[in-house]
Every structure is written in structure tokens, then in C-alpha cells.
Amino acid sequence: MLDDTGSTGDYAVDSTPDALSVSEITVQLRRRLGWYGLEGLTLRTLARQRDGHFLAELSVGDETIYRELIDGWTGRVRQREMVWPDSVAREIRAA
């Protein structure tokens, strides 16, 4: 089934006027997590999903360390997940 953007992929651009923009979600995320100016910490992914939620991933280098699923209309966090970077997981398994 095609959405209104003509895409069949997992992500689609939401044209709903009440939906929050990517930049609004980014600013809220940065304020809430307090990561302005933290060296090496970057916003790897911020994508709007078909259901109107945003998936945001924070990373250090190439490794994701934190994920949030954010409601695209209210800006409320629906789900949070700390992610063990691969390097840390390898050290734990080796111990």
C-alpha cells in the first residue's frame, strides 16, 4: 500500500499540520537529555515513522547508546532504551 508520499518504505513524511517538525523534536530531545556541547555524542537517527512517531538514536562514534520513540504530535516519550554499545557488550561477554 502506498502512502500519500508514494513510498512503500517504513518511513514517510507526515504532512499533518498539527504534527511536530523534525527540528522541534530535535530541540526538545536536546533540552531533555542535556546533551548540547557534549563531545562525541551525536544524534544519529531522527526519522518519522508511518504511525507519526519519531525514532531518535544517540550515538558515540559508530555505536548507538540510547533510543527513544517520541510521539510526533505531543512530543511525549513513548519508549526509552539504553543500548549497550558493541564494545561494552563484548567486554561483558569476555569477563
Image (spheres, helix red, strand yellow):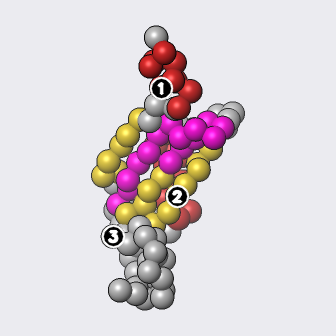
Q: From which residue to which does the magenta span run?
A: 57-71
Secondary-structure class at tag 2: strand
Camera-side residue of 39 and 11: 11
Q: Nearer the viewer, mark 1 or mark 2?
A: 1
From this viewpoint, which residue is outermost toward the front? 94
Extreme residue toward the left, this view = 78
Type of the residue with mark 1: Ala
Residue 57: where, in percent of width, then height?
50, 48
- Mark 1 and mark 2: Cα distance apart in space: 24 Å
**Depth order, front residue of 23/1:** 1
Query: Of label 1 and label 3, which has the lower sequence position?
Result: 3
Residue 60 painted magenta: yes
Q: Residue at x 34, y 54 (%)?
A: 76
- Identify the residue under disc 3: 51
When asked about the image quadrant of residue 39, the answer is top right
Label located before the other in sequence (1 or 2): 2
Q: At which x and y percent is residue 24?
A: 51, 61
- Answer whether labels 2 and 3 touch (C-beta < 8 Å): no
User: Is 21 rendered above or below residue 66?
Assistant: below
- Residue 75: name its quadrant: bottom left
Question: Which amino acid, mark 3?
Answer: Asp
Q: CA distance from mark 1 to mark 3?
A: 32 Å
Amino acid type at image mark 2: Leu
Secondary structure, magenta segment, majority class = strand
Front residue (pair 70, 7) = 7
* Label disc, if present, on residue 23 of the rendered structure: none
Q: Nearer the viewer, residue 6 or 57?
A: 6
Q: Label 2: which residue? A: 46
Residue 80 in the image: above or below residue 86: below
- Residue sitting at x 44%, y 80%: 8
- Residue behind mark 1: 89
Q: Is residue 72 visible?
A: no
